[in-house]
Amino acid sequence: MYRSSFIIFFVSLLLLTSCSKDDGYSYEDPYTGEEEPVIDPVSDEELLDLVQEQTLKYFTDFAEPNSQMARERYHPNESNSSTVTTGGTGFGLMALVVGVERGYISRSEAVQQFSTIANFLENSNRFKGAWSHWIDGNTGQVQPFSQMDDGGDLVETSFLVQGMIVVREYLKNGSEEEQAIAQKFDTLWRDVQWDWYTNNQNVLYWHWSPNYNFQINLALEGYNECLITYILAASSPDHAIDPQIYHDGWARSGNITASNSTYGLPLILSHNGHQQYGGPLFWAHYSYLGLDPTNLSDQYANYWQLNKNHTLINYTYCVNNPNNYAGYGEDFWGLTASYTKNNDGTIGYTAHSPTNDTGVVSPTAAVSSIPYTPNESLAFMHNLYENHNSLSWGPAGFYDAVSLIGNDWAAERYLAIDQGPMIVMIENYRTGLIWDLFMQAPEIQNGLDNLGFTY
C-alpha cells in the first residue's frame, strides 16, 4: 500500500467523522438560483498578487495561536481545533518568506513567527529527530494520525525541513536575532536521523514509533510525492543515507522508469498506482517547492519534463472531459487530493485524478502547476476569480474544492497542504525565489551531487 492511499484512508475517516452531526456541522448549498456576479477582469500580475496575498492569511491570520504553526485545516465560521501539521507548516514557512518579499507582511512579523515556530518545534515530541504528522499546537505532544502512526513521519518531516532550510538561507546574513533563528532551524534539521529510518534496509521507511517500531512497514518507493525525502536524507551533514539506498529503494533498482505515453506525452517514470495518467497533481508540487526541477536530471528522469508532462496529461484529460462534467475545459481543470463532495452532499476527502474523477476540481492543482503550465493555470485562475468569485473565493483565497455540476458547489474549507503550494509555486513562476534559496544550500548541492543529479 502506497502512502497516498494510506493517508487518504485515514484522513477520509477523520474528515467524515468531523462532518457528522456530533460536531454540529451541516452543509448548506451555496447555490441561490441567481446568476453568478462577474468580477471586473484583472491583469495577470494583479491576479497573482491577489491570490498570493489572500492565501497567505491561512498561515498568518488563521495560524494556530500558541505555536504559530499551520493548522491542519481551517473551517471559516466554525470552531477549529489546535491540531497543527508539520508538512503544511513547512509549506507555510516558505510562504511567509514570499509574504515578506512581496510586502504582504512585515519582516518583523515574519521573524516573530519564525522564532515562535522554531521554539515550538524544538520542544515538541521528536522521534529519532523526526516530527509526527500532527502535533497538538498547545502542548507540543504528538497527536496520532492513526493507531500505529503515533511517532515519526519522515515524509512530513521532509516537507517541514524543506521550509526550514529556505528560512535558514533567507535569514542567515540578517540581524543578530535573525541569525539566531537561522541557527536554530539549522540545528533542528541536522538532528533528523534519516539513516535510522532505513531500518537497516536499502530503502527509507515512512514511519517509526517507539510503541510500534516499524510495524506500519511503508517503504518509500518511487514514483510519488516523496523525492524530497531522499534528497534531504542524502544531504544530511550528520545522518546521511548511502546513495545506494536511493537507487535500490526509491528507484526500485531502476524499475522506476516507464516507457508509456498518454496523449503523446511520455510518463517518464512509473507513477505508483497511476500508470496511465500519472498521480494526483500534488506529486508535481510537494517535492518541488524548494527543489528546483528546471534543470534537474538524474539517470532516471528529466524532472522538468516529468512534471510538465504529468500536468499536461491531467489538463488534457479535463479538457477532453470523457465524463461530460459541467464546467470542465481549458479554464476549469485540475485533479488532486482535496476535500470533495460526497454523493449525499456532505464534504469528504479524496485524491482526485483521471482515474478517480468525480467532477470536483481542486484549485491548488491548476494554480500550483503554474511553473509548468502558465497559460493554462492563469486561464483557470481568471475564470474562477472573475466568473465564480462568490462561489470559490473566501477569507484565505480559493476554497479547497469546486464543482459546477448541477447546483454550483464549493467546499468552503481550507487545508494547509493545499494552500501553501499555491503561494510558493506562484512565486517560483514569478521570480524563482524559493527555488533559489533552497538550491543555494551547500548541503543540498552536496546531496544532489552524491546521488548523481545535474542541476
Image: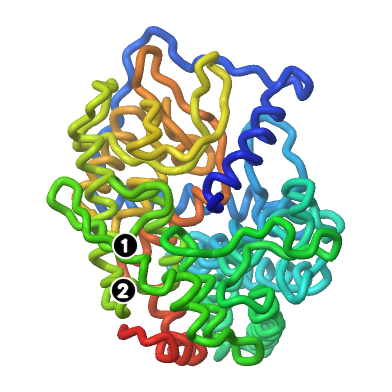
Residue, x 71% and y 83% (percent of image)?
A: 191
Q: Is residue 15 visible?
A: yes
Amino acid carrying mark 1 in the image: Leu
Image x and y of residue 172, in percent: 57, 88
| Residue topped by disc 1 | 269
The quarter of the picture where the C terminus appears is bottom left
Q: Are marks 2 and 1 in contact (CB under 8 Å)?
A: yes
Q: Is residue 16 left or right of residue 422?
A: right
Give the camera-side residue of 427 and 251: 251
Count of all numbered marks drawn on residues in the image: 2
Q: Secondary structure at mark 1?
A: loop
Q: Is residue 89 visible?
A: no
Image x and y of residue 146, in percent: 74, 46
| Residue topped by disc 2 | 300
Quadrant position of residue 324: top left
Calculate the distance from the C-alpha at mark 2 to the C-alpha at mark 1. 8 Å
Residue, x 58% and y 84% (percent of image)?
A: 241
Image x and y of residue 415, in percent: 57, 44
Residue, x 52% and y 53% (percent of image)?
A: 56
Of the numbered discs 2 and 1, the one sitting upstream in the chain is 1
Amino acid carrying mark 2 in the image: Tyr
Residue, x 36% and y 36% (percent of image)?
A: 355
Q: Is residue 313 left or right of residue 8?
A: left
Q: Secondary structure at mark 2?
A: loop
Image x and y of residue 447, in percent: 48, 87
Question: Is residue 455 positioned above or below 310 on the image?
Answer: below
